[in-house]
Image (spheres, rainbow, N blue to C red):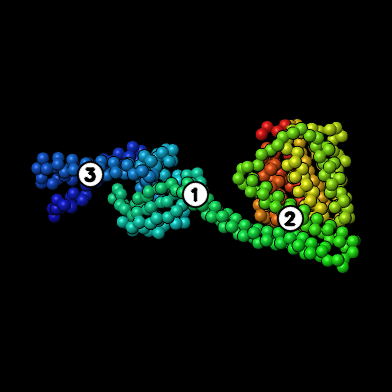
Amino acid sequence: MKTSGKNQLDEIEIYQNSESQEVKYDFGALNDLQITEPKRKEMETTLLENHHFNKSILQTIPFGMHIVDKEGNVLFQNEVMIELCGSRNSGKKCWEIYRDDKTNCPECPLLSEISNGETHVKESHDILGRKTFLISSTGAFFQGKKAVFEVFQDITERKQAEIELIAAKERAEESDRLKSDFLANMSHEIRTPLNSIIGFSELMSDPDFDRDQLSEFAGIINVNGNNLLLLISDIMDLSRIEAGQVKLRKSIFSVNQLIKEIRNEYSFKAEEKGIELRLDPLNPSEEIFVENDALRIKQILVNFVGNAIKFTKVGFIEIGIRLNGDLILFQVKDTGIGIAPKYREHIFQRFRQVETAYCREHGGTGLGLAISKSLVELMGGKLWMESEQGKGSVFYFNIPVQCTI
């Protein structure tokens, strides 16, 4: 029985060279048709034009694209995909080319028997060097057999931006929560000394109290007034630091004399708690002079010493200095309660305190260490700490001997 012209056209064979990606047509079937020579030429031209048109469309896709058979063998790659891979990979398994682990992904459309014309879209990670791609897979027929047409869109930067945006949102929410807690804490920290000042000021006007009692009231008012002044100073310092308005006032001074002054000023407060405030016996005996802001350096050391006194019940507090080339290292060591590992990364953040009953008992704004860290960095130095819970802590900071700011 003679085959119809339409069926013979369906049997026209297409061959593709896997290396050159050139397609060749076998027009032998056209010769068997009872058609005129001009008509045959026209049909050949139409087929070739359609092929070149389709190929040009594939090459102009701005994303990587390939066609694979149902076994995962690469049949075709556009130029963008070849550039992504660094070489032409026709005939190789797609997962061995693209996936970092060289294994077939479990969501592979080849495994799910994707139908002709059906499209699946998925995100795939660890592709071509830990990148993330959005892959659109469409079932198709190519070279007379079932295949999958896939488009690769690199969304690595977009996914990273999304991750950073989520992290920024979480940080903003955490910051809002901390600031709310801070404001509530400030209300308590401000009202406590104010209530003492107002209350004992009223008692001092009562003639029934003797001179010794009035002197005691005056001492309480003085302590609470100083606490309130320190609190306001911390808030003002934080505001100036955040606004970039803190200026260093350089002068040449002896760090040996500076730490002696701090020891003398705070020894009585330490002795009241039964602890010793001393200088490190390994401190250099020669005088060390530094050009920097002496008041700001003292502010940082006073903050360290004040915290050490607050959180040390027995033992000692030790102030040390070391000269290391162009840097001067300061350290304050204590035998206090120490800091648990889960809190160490937070203690230098603004509005953060170690949330323990012992800390809440002693109050505080949670600003001192954050301010100290900002000041050290402004001086071109670094601040860090070491601690062992229940055994004590050591707080360090270094700055250049010669201030360049």
- Looking at the picture, which amino acid does disc 3 mark? Asn
Callout 1 crowding tier (Cα within 10 Å): few <14, some 14–19, many ≥20: few
Callout 3 crowding tier (Cα within 10 Å): few <14, some 14–19, many ≥20: few
Tell me which residue sits at (60%, 55%) in the image. 175
- Which residue position holds label 2? 228
137 or 404, nearer to the observer: 404
The quadrant of the rendering that contains the C terminus is top right
Of the residues tagged 1 and 2, which is closer to the observer? 2
- Which residue position holds label 1? 161
Instruction: Classify 359 as above or below 10.
Output: below
At mark 1, the secondary structure is helix
380 or 367, nearer to the observer: 367
Task: State the CA–CA distance, disc 3 to disc 2.
Answer: 85 Å
Tell me which residue sits at (37%, 58%) in the image. 113
Q: Is residue 84 left or right of residue 325?
A: left
69 or 370, nearer to the observer: 370
Q: Upstream in the sequence, badge 1 or badge 2? A: 1
At mark 3, the secondary structure is helix
- Give the label on residue 50, or none: 3
At mark 2, the secondary structure is helix
282 or 92, nearer to the observer: 282
- Looking at the picture, which amino acid does disc 1 mark? Ala
- Looking at the picture, which amino acid does disc 2 mark? Leu
Task: State the CA–CA distance, disc 1 to disc 2.
Answer: 44 Å
Q: How many marks?
A: 3
Tell me which residue sits at (10%, 46%) in the image. 34
Residue 91: x %, y % from top left:
39, 43
Residue 398: x %, y % from top left:
73, 39
Q: Upstream in the sequence, badge 1 or badge 3? A: 3
